[in-house]
Each structure stands twice: as C-alpha cells, then as structure tokens.
Image (tube, grey):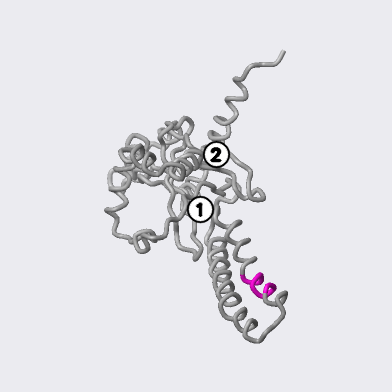
Amino acid sequence: MCVGPVSGRPTLRSQSHAVPERLLIYHAGTGRTTFLACLKVTTVFGLAFFTFLVAPAYIIADKPLWQILGIVSCGIVPFIVASYTSSPFVVFVHLRLPAYARHPDRELLRRFVRNPPAGTQLDFTTMNLVGRPRLATVAISDLAPAHKRLGIVNLIDTQASARQTATTSDPKMARAKLGTRLMPTLAKQASRSTVTFSSRFPFVHLPPNTCFGAPASNNSRSVQYAWVWADLLASIQQRARKPDQNGPKSG
C-alpha cells in the first residue's frame, strides 16, 4: 500500500497484482542446477571417450581382458551412478492455481494451500541425461512421501507407476482407457511451440519420471512463495499418515 501524490489517499497498487497461473514454489538454486548439469554432460562425454575411443584402442593393441574391462568401467560406472542419483533431482516446481486462488488477496491463497483439492496439479521440472529440462505434471493426490535412492527421493508418483505397469502388460487396453483422459493434456502439449525430445526422436520412448527429490530444506531463498511448497509437503505427509491413524486399533 502506498500514498497518492496529490490526494494523500492510500492506493492498492501493491495489492493489485494477481498471483500467476503457474506459481513458482520451489527452485533448487542456480549454482546447484548448473553443477549437476555439467556433471551429467561430463559423464556422457566420459562414457563416449572410454567406451568408443580408449577401449577399441586397447583391443587393437591386444591388451589383457582385465585392462579392457577396467577402461570400459571407467566410463560406465560414473555414468550409471550419476544417472541414478541425479535423475530425481527437481529444478523447479510450479503450482497450477485456479482462478479464485489467484486473487491479489494472499489469504485466499493460504486457504487454498492449507486444503488443496485432490486434482490440484504440480509441474515438476527435472533434467535428462544431457541436462535438458524434462516436465512431469502430477496431481497432488497421486503423490506420496518416500525415502529412496540414498534419501534423495522424497516424493513418488504412484499413479504414473501404475499406468506404466498397465501399459507394459497390455498397451492397447491402457491406451484405450487413458485416451479420453489424456486427450486435453496431449492437445495442449502439441500446441506448444517448443519441440520436445520425443517429437524430435519419436522412436525413443523414455519412461515417465515417477521419483522426485525436492525437500523443503533445499528450496532457494529467492523463491517468494517457498512457504507454499513447505505447506504442500506437510499436507502430503499428513494425508499419507491418515490410513494408519484411522486403522483398527489392536486391543
């Protein structure tokens, strides 16, 4: 709130800005993200160097088998470790807000976050093998707390895992069931001007990212609405504990 220059009356200039539709609630930090992206690219180049350059040279030179395997492992092991530990790393988390929660009055946003609807969607941005962004949209009701991959993963998408299993067992049946649900989402994604990895390489089918590592303690201080992510994490953990609390009591 500020005072008008002529009339001296207070104006609501600072409160006139509505909350954006995709609200940034988590950011891992520029330094941490840049380091991890460089690490991913380095392991890819290391894999290519040791596997496709050094190892064939050792084979041509008739080196012992243990030396050849050692050279190949120098490229494969760092690549596998970096891919396994860094794939759940979340760079951004955006909250998709309905119109009524985007009101300039922040109290409405607080009420929405305290009791979000089950269909509220979150956009998780991770990185692929070469550090390019990878987007996964998940409903808040499909998220469950977890402790996997040496404690890196704190959230999992349970429904995406079920859909992946159904698609693997019976692809035609899974596509028929999910066709009507995913049609609006696929239409929106197709209308975007950016070309994704799948559209450039349609023969490559990457599995959906179901594990996410975005603890509230790693949230960047520059995020204005960091409290939203902390409250949503608390809500997800509380919802996961409800079945245990409401279960039958042993006498």
Percent from the top left, x then y, of residue 154? 59, 44
Percent from the top left, x then y, of residue 93? 47, 48
Q: Is residue 121 magenta?
A: no
Where does the magenta region start and end? 69-75
On screen, 218 above or below 43?
above
Q: Check residue 233 in the rendering and tell me which mark sits there, or answer none.
A: 2
Q: Going from the N terminus, do you reach mark 1 or mark 2 first?
A: 1
Cα distance in 3D space between marks 1 and 2: 15 Å
**What residue is shown at x 31% (from left), y 46% (from top)?**
4
Percent from the top left, x then y, of residue 134? 44, 56
Task: State the residue in front, 108 or 194.
Answer: 194
Q: Which residue is mark 1?
A: 27
**What residue is shown at x 40% (from left), y 34% (from top)?**
119
* 233 relative to 97 in the view: left or right: right
Q: What amino acid is at disc 1?
A: His
**What residue is shown at x 67% (from left), y 84% (from top)?**
62
Q: What amino acid is at disc 2?
A: Leu
